[in-house]
Image: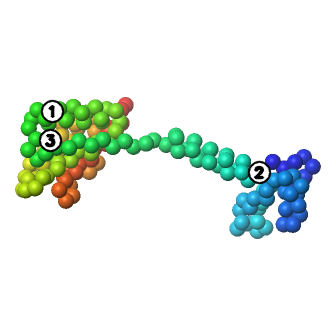
Amino acid sequence: MVGDNVDIGVYPLNKAQDIANNLDMDLVEISPNASPPVCKVLDYKKFLYEQKKREKQLKSKSTKVIVKEIRFGPQTDEHDYEFKKKHAEKFLKDGAKLKAFVFFKGRSIIYKDQGEILLLKLAQDLESLGKVEQLPKLESKKMIMIMSPKKIK
């Protein structure tokens, strides 16, 4: 935003500062490592505002990953499994990642093989809608499996 009466060119630092002061603007160093350093005369507050605006716009365009969770017990019966499977199908169809886990209370940790079978069965049932991102893995009292939705063609 250099005025019409100022030529674009190479100036010594004190002359560049005088030009900025005469225009009631700021002298901003653009690339300090260049030889000589590159500066620009502009309104610094407006520059910061536009920079934040650009960052906000880029952030709004980025896709947000939504993770939905479904919790099972190690001895979940068939009806509950089907009910939760329907919810999992809906989550994957909506484009959200699915975090399915089996929570082991107390001594039920001895049934960790049943929990793994349950999660693998879920992965097999939802194979058409999503792919397994992380196979069932035991972390303290939870066995966790993560699925991501398949791209719709």
User: On the rendered image, what quadrant is the C terminus found in?
Assistant: top left
Name the N-terminal-most of marks 3 and 2: 2
Density class for disc 3 (Cα within 10 Å; few <14, some 14-19, many ≥20) is few
Q: Is residue 9 visible?
A: no
> Which residue carries the number 3 mark?
121
| Separation of residues labelled 1 and 2 (CA atoms) | 62 Å
Instruction: Report the residue marked by disc 2.
Output: 43
Q: Amino acid at mark 3?
A: Lys
- Mark 3 vs mark 2: in front: 2
Residue count near mark 1 (Cα–Cα under 10 Å), binned few <14, some 14–19, many ≥20: few
The vertical placement of 91 against 34, above or below, is above
User: In screen coordinates, is 86 left or right of 65?
Assistant: left
Q: Mark 3 to mark 2: distance in Å? A: 62 Å
N-terminal of the two: label 3 or label 1?
1
* Disc 2 residue type (three-letter): Asp
**SS state under label 3:** helix
In the depicted view, which residue is nearer to us: 23 or 85?
23
